[in-house]
Amino acid sequence: MNKAIIFDLDGTLLQTHYHSCFAAHETLRALGLPDVSDALVMRHIGEPADVFLRAITPDDSDLAAFEKLFDANERAALQRVGKLFDGVPELLQQLKSRGYQLAICSNGSREYVETALTTTGIRQLFSRLACAGEYPDKAAAVSAIISEWNCALAVVVGDRVHDMEAATANGVPFIAAGYGYGGAEMSTAGYRANSPREVLTNMEQIEKSLFK
């Protein structure tokens, strides 16, 4: 039986605020723009790039120039301080040992996703990446992965409403990463993990409910 777990990256596997907050402050400072709080940056982690960037830069600024510098600063910071949530490597290894194929579905660019996974040492665990610009939205990306792998069981794990909507659109279970950046967005999720380790517990519950 083909089984897949499709993970969001930022706020689900990766503690993105370590490098994204640094990059935001550095970019705003370099361009002579007003700084923003870490809390504001963290509220928008996981949003599509244009939404995230517009949230942290003034409306009248050159968004293209800001994005170019921010991306460079973020990748540099990611390589220095990129950090997974505690328990992520162990979770992924256990899921692989139980026969799950692992995929990433992210609003980040392919370069960003590849850098994050390689820097944190987990790239080899993922068979499939779906990144920003490759599909119309996350729902389409999840659909493509499920179809390509002919999944009898697929589950989406994420921390933002876009992840939950992608799972709902495809009729598959969703596990909310309650430790991520989504906050109240995740209050209606049927399954909730308060740490990466709890994802495995949720998966066991899902399997029991589907394959009684």
Image: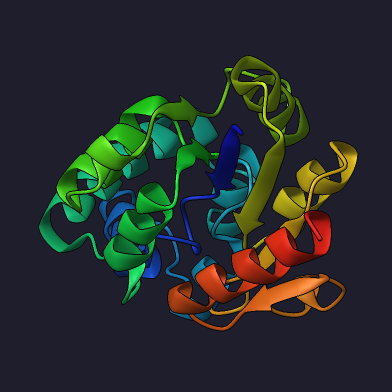
Residue that appears at 35% across and 51% down? 97
Q: Which residue lies most toward the left here?
A: 80
Residue 115 seen in the figure: no
Front position in the image: 11 or 18: 11
Residue that appears at 81% across and 70% down? 189
Q: Is residue 101 above or below residue 51?
A: above
**How far across and down, in percent of the image, does residue 152 sit?**
71, 34
Q: Is residue 46 above or below residue 86?
A: above
Scheme of colours in the image: rainbow
Q: Is residue 43 above or below residue 59?
A: below
- Which quadrant, please, contains the C terminus? bottom right
**How far across and down, in percent of the image, does residue 82 sit?**
22, 59
Image-based side of 121 in relation to 89, left or right: left
Q: Which residue lies most toward the bottom here?
A: 194
Residue that appears at 53% across and 78% down? 198
- Which quadrant, please, contains the N terminus? top right
Snapshot quadrant of residue 38: bottom left
Residue 166 seen in the figure: yes
Residue that appears at 32% across and 28% down? 111
Image-based side of 173 in relation to 119, left or right: right
